[in-house]
Structure formats: structure tokens, C-alpha cells
Image (spheres, rainbow, N blue to C red):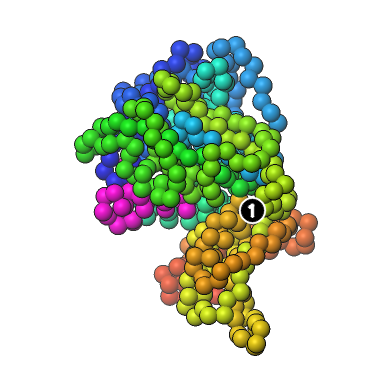
Amino acid sequence: MGHGHDHDHAHGHGHDHAHGHDHAHGHGHDHAHGHGHDHAHGHDHAHGHDHDHAHGHDHDHAHGQGHDPAHGHDHPRAPLLEEGAGAGKILFFDAFSGIAGDMTIAALLDLGVPLLVIERAVAALPIEGFHLHRGHAHRSGIVATSFDVHVEAPQPERTYGSIDAMLAAAPLDPPVAALARRIFRRLGEAEAAVHRIRLEDVHFHEVGAVDAIVDIVGAAAAIVHIGAEVVGSPLPMGRGFVKARHGILPLPPPAAVACLRGVPTYGVDLDAELVTPTGAAIIAALATRFERWPTFAPDRIGFGAGQRELPDRPNLLRVVLGTRSGGEESLGSASHVIVEANVDDLTGEVAGHAIEALFAAGALDAWAAPITMKKGRPALTIAALAAAPQADAVATALLRETTSIGLRKIPVARTERPRRITTVKTAYGAIRVKISEGPFGPPQIKPEFDDCAAAARTHGVPVREVVSAALAAAKG
């Protein structure tokens, strides 16, 4: 959890398996960090929790080295999912045993998201002192993927403000950064509400901060890679209590409940933490709707393992990628959607606020264009471009923040130049530069304006001088 809690179960480990823990790079050791919180779910909390690492899964290290499963199973896997493979489809999170950050990553890897997608996103962040494990676990005869963040070095406490700034500045793909920031904001706002503090002051403690960062950024990267609309099942809520840094907390954790405003839940007769704050923030931010099972045709299935055995159900998160039925609204195979509405009674200030809300909801671009409606009424078209999975969330924001009683969704395809971000050194300091390449003529080079403006203020020079210096450095 955020501020001040030290649940003793950071990533939810402390499960007991008997099938060995083989590391591909040969250390073959048992993690026994000396922590001890027996959580029936044992997942991640966004705060530095102490936990037992006695898992005994057959793990791969994130740098892609293989492993020899101690059970002797071959674990055949389906072909990896290509980027955009879920466009126009539904990705259903069937959380019959709850959800946590590590289970989310594990299930998406099991579905076919390449591990490299997670690695690249995490490698873009200025954090270190940990490595990733992917392995397998057996639950009721089902072979599922497991995922673990193994922290190797002391970690600082991080505030929500510092984490959000880090995500904003990191060279992540813009849709990944926007989605990760949206998830973290949901988690931060929940913690701030529980502790009655400012959002920027919410603390994520040591190990738990690294776990939450990896899980949230990795989940965002995987969801953007798939490109499907996310639908969630109602969430089961266990009861009981958990020891935290400042005392005993009820289950489900207060921050998890705060994250789930508007999300359907139901109680189960189990003293266990089934939904963690990080898991709650992820599914609440991702899902466009919740239902017991959507009307669709399953294509691919992935299972992510929780870290403990549960007495009455397999501790798994199932994700199902499927094709919409003919009766559902479909955007076809379009990768992106334009959402727009015409309004004739918005002030400029309200229109500007609506555009900001569209970006916050996940829009890649948003704009207002003047039009003339019937009877010569001046009006505005408020529009946004969104990746298909975020289209419903953007549409909700458009209806919420304007006076329109309806909107249009226009499926579109987008051609993008391959883009990378590099940092150049100038007389005014380091400036990030976007370089767009590909078979479309000379590269387009654009310095990050915020970096240039900050450097111009620091050195007392016009911003165009900093822009020119950054362009010269990038071209030289």
C-alpha cells in the first residue's frame, strides 16, 4: 500500500511449492529474504512489504535465459502475439480468484505477449537493483505462468509525485506512458483518500514501489501491445486482517476498495487477500465494463499464477482474447478510433478543460474545430484520437466533460513513422530529441519542447536558441 504501510507481503511471495527453483544462470538458490507474511494470495502491494520468497517455481530470468522445469513437463506454448493482434477483439480478465500485479503480468505473458515487451518498457525507467523472473506453477493440474520481481539492492522510498514525473520523462511509447500514469494515478488517489493526504505526498515504500512500478508499467506495455478492449469480471473479495506498518488493517485493503469505486465486487467465504491495491488499480483503469462473461468467441487463453495455494479454488487469473460476436458493436480490425461530438453551447474554457480530460483518459491527440450547425449556429467539434482499447474510456470522458448527449466513433487505421527518443548534449544541458525515421524521406527531428523551455529559463536565453542547439547536436 502507499503511505506508511509495510504489509509483510510485497509481491505476494511466501507460497510453498515443492517443485524446485531452477535459475537459468545457475545460481539455483532459494529466496528466503527473511520476511514473513502468509497471505493466501500473497501478491503485490505498493508499499515495501516484507515477504517470504520460498517459491520453488521453475523460473526464467528476464534476460531471456531458459530453464529446465523440475516437473519434467515441456510446457508447449502458442506462438507469440504480434503487436496489435487484439485490434477489434475483447481481452477478458476472468478474475475468479482475484487479481494482483504479478498475476496480471504472468497471465499476459502466458497469453503470448513477448517477455521482451515487458523488459523494454521496464528498461526505459531509471530504476535498478532488481531483476525479473518468469516461470511456471501448477494449480489444480493447470500449468500457468508465474512472474516475480526479485529485488537485489536497497530501494529508496518514492512518492507518487516522483513516480509520475519519472514516467512522464521516461522514453516510453506515449500510449504506454499515458496508460501507466493513469493506473498509478488511480492507485495514488486511493492511497491519498485513505490517508487524507495530498496525492503528491503518497509514499510507496522501498520494495513495494519497485514491484508496483514494474507491474503497472509492464501491464500497460502488454495491453498496448495487444490492442484489445479490456473487459473485467466482477471481483471476489476475501475477508480477514493483515499486519501493516502502523497496525492491523482489514481485508480487503482500504486502498484496494478505494481503487474499485464503480467496479462490481462480491464476497467470498475466505480469509485471504484476493484483490491487491495494485491489481485493483490495473483492472479498474483498464476495463471498459464488467460482466460475468462477455459474448465472444475465445481465441487464446492465458493463466497467471498467484503465489499461494487457496483452499477452495485454483489461485489463477485467466485472461481470454476473443472475437466479438456479430451483435456487439465492433470497430473491425481498426487499430485506432476517432471519437467526436458537435456542441454549440460550450465556452472556450470548458472546451479546453474537456480536451485536457480526453488526454487524461488516454487520448493520443485531442482537438476542437469550429463548425457551423443548423440555423447558422456557431459550434465546435470536440474530437480525440485513441487506440482502440482506450476508445470507450475516451468516449466516456467526452460525454462527461461536455454537454453533448451523444458522440460518433469512427474506426481508422494509422500509419506511423518508426520513432525513437535520444538525448543530446548542448551548451544548455541535456535535451531529449524525438527522431522519426522509416522509408518516408529524411528523418524528422524534434527536440522535446518542455526540455528546451526549462533550459531556456535556466540560462536566460530565448527558447528558439535551445531548440536550434538541440537540432544541431542531433544532426551532428
Q: Whole-percent x and y of residue 98?
A: 45, 34
Most frequent secondary structure within the magenta stretch: helix
Q: Residue furthest left?
A: 247
Quadrant assignment for the C terminus = bottom right
- Above or below, 81 against 344 in this view is above
Identify which residue is drawn at 29% across, 49% down.
194
Q: Does residue 351 show up magenta in the picture?
A: no
SS category of the residue bearing label 1: helix
207 or 469: nearer the viewer: 207
Q: Whole-percent x and y of residue 337?
A: 66, 59
Q: Which residues are magenta?
A: 180-205
- Quick check: 13 left or right of 195? right
Can residue 29 be seen by looking at this rendering?
no
- Quick check: 298 left or right of 61? right
Label 1 Cα neighbours within 10 Å, binned few <14 / some 14-19 / many ≥20 = many
Q: Residue furthest bottom?
A: 376
279 or 26: nearer the viewer: 279
Q: Disc 1 residue type?
A: Ala
Q: Residue furthest front?
A: 327
Identify which residue is drawn at 55% across, 71% down.
404
Identify which residue is drawn at 36% across, 44% down.
257
Q: Which residue is mark 1?
A: 388
Q: Whole-percent x and y of residue 143?
A: 57, 21
- Above or below, 379 against 292 in this view is below
Q: Does residue 198 show up magenta in the picture?
A: yes
Identify which residue is drawn at 61% across, 35% down.
320
Can residue 286 be seen by looking at this rendering?
yes
